[in-house]
Amino acid sequence: MSLIRWDPFDDLASLRESMDKLFDELFTRRPRGQAELAWAPAVEVFETENDVMVRAELPGIDPKNVEITVTQDTLTLKGEAKLDREDKARNYYRRELRYGSFLRSIQLPSDVKGDQATASYKNGILEIRVPKSERAKPKSVKVEVAE
């Protein structure tokens, strides 16, 4: 029989992972009956003078398998990262690559023209450009000075 050295920090790491999972489950809102999703891509959201831009990290995912939906103030990304093949003969030490379905809804900062959205994919980054509606664009007003 061999002895295993006890490391109290291993227990703390396990406790932290459990607490993270608990808080994720408590504070992640999803429609009733929807299966738990494994992950969601990281995004950047910013605006220019005429557009709202959303950039999403989707390395290794075929952009044809990503569904993009834009409403008046929300953009939704839905898709799946597929595992090419699972090799039962491999003895993994660590597996951190993400696979499975994802769904990410992003609140947009202003009213947009969803029907005019365009998307491009390059080097694992999906970039979505959504034009702002006319009422969301900044307007300049000239001030007349009376003499």
Image (cartoon, grey):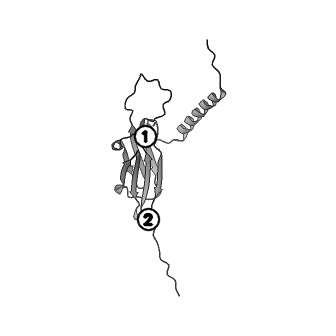
Callout 1 crowding tier (Cα within 10 Å): few <14, some 14–19, many ≥20: some
Q: Earlier in the sequence, mark 2 or mark 1?
A: 1
Distance between mark 2 and mark 1 Cα atoms:
32 Å
Q: Position of residue 65 (x, y in %)?
A: 35, 41
Viewer can see residue 28? yes
The residue lying at 47 percent from left, 26 percent from top is 92
Q: How many marks?
A: 2
Residue situated in front as seen by the camera: 81 or 35: 81
| Amino acid type shown at disc 1 | Phe
Residue bearing the label numbered 2:
137
Q: Position of residue 101 (x, y in %)?
A: 41, 37
Q: Position of residue 120 (x, y in %)?
A: 36, 50
Check the image and report above or below for 37 versus 49: above
Q: Quadrant of the N terminus?
A: top right
Q: Residue furthest bottom?
A: 147
Residue 27: which quarter of the image? top right
The residue lying at 50 percent from left, 78 percent from top is 143
The residue lying at 42 percent from left, 62 percent from top is 50
Callout 2 crowding tier (Cα within 10 Å): few <14, some 14–19, many ≥20: some
The residue lying at 57 percent from left, 33 percent from top is 17
Q: Residue furthest left?
A: 64
Residue 102: give its label: 1
